[in-house]
Amino acid sequence: MNAATGRADMRTGWSPYAFVAPFVLVFLVFTAYPTLQSIALSVQQTYGPQASRYVGLQNFVGLAHDPLFWKALTNTAVFAAGSIFIQLPCSLGLALLLNKPQVRGRAFFRLVFFSPSLVGMIFVAVIFSLIFEKRTGLLNVLLHRAFGFDPEFPWLEDYVMPALIIAALWMYVGFNMVYFLAALQNVSPDLVDASRVDGAGVWHRFRHVTIPAIRPVGTFIVLLSLVGSFQLFELPYLLLGEGGGPNNRGLTLVMYLYQTGFETGDLGYASAIGWVIAMLLGAAAIMQRAVARGGER
């Protein structure tokens, strides 16, 4: 083997590593190092970016006795429940409706329902701050004229979480609808026709044919909604301000993490909050996977 062949083989041997190197470098700098650093910070108490002291698991123990943490966790769990049990059924219902061939203008309505997810979060916060205004807000005006409700209903004062759920419903119901529409394309028409011939009604066809066919996508959407709910920050921050509204009624876990880390300056306590969020999401994903497997059986 001559020298030229040896150099060519060497270049060929290093080629895969050269292609992988940019990803590895970015991963190490922006994922691996911050993750390890956050683990180290979670067992420290910091006083700004320079001063810190080792406290072990004291940050995690402190969270268990922190009323603001439990308030933020409760608010986040309520929002997540609204996303899963209100938003997703609405998305599935719209998908079932717009999947029917006899519905005219299906493409137009799909675009109409999906378009709110393309709007910027600042725009959404401004719009819904006007919608939820007392007396002059659109929602209070409509409820007062239709049902005689109090025209000064305090949405952004006493009913913060329902207001956030309504705003998120407007934003994401069409986004999840698109996923369900894609899943409904995989429902076998032959199975539907066979079940209809066997005398199955609409509900039985939906339960025994449609749901098993769309279960994988449904599982993914539930997990996506759960992760998004536990990462809720921009909407309540822009709509309610830094404190999450009166008496912290709109305070979420990520908002509390932000306040602790970047306003109070205790990055160690904020890192502990972040790892608790990660553990909660991991546990929820494992339980959801177990439930999905049980349903498949």
Image: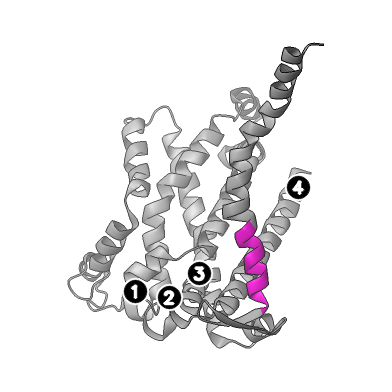
At mark 3, the secondary structure is: helix
List the residue tagged with mark 4: 293
Q: Cβ–Cβ below 8 Å for labels 1 and 3?
A: no
Q: What is the CA distance from the residue labelled 1 to the residue labelled 3?
A: 14 Å
- Which amino acid does the dot numbered 4 rest on? Arg
Q: Which residues are magenta?
A: 33-43
Percent coordinates x, y for residue 171 in the rendering: 38, 53
At mark 4, the secondary structure is: helix
At mark 1, the secondary structure is: helix
Q: Cβ–Cβ below 8 Å for labels 1 and 2?
A: yes
From the image, which quarter does the N terminus lie in?
A: top right
Q: What is the CA distance from the residue labelled 2 to the residue labelled 4?
A: 35 Å
Q: Cβ–Cβ below 8 Å for labels 2 and 3?
A: no
Q: What is the CA distance from the residue labelled 2 to the residue labelled 3?
A: 11 Å
Main secondary structure found in the magenta portion: helix
- Of mark 4 and mark 3, the one earlier in the sequence is 3
Q: In which image quadrant can residue 70 be found?
A: bottom right
Q: Is residue 263 above or below residue 216?
A: below
Please tell me the numbered disc located at residue 250.
2
Q: Residues within 10 Å of mark 2 (few under 14, many from 20)?
A: many
Q: In which image quadrant can residue 14 be found?
A: top right
Percent coordinates x, y for residue 32 in the rendering: 65, 55
- Which amino acid does the dot numbered 3 rest on? Val
Q: Is residue 225 above or below residue 46?
A: above
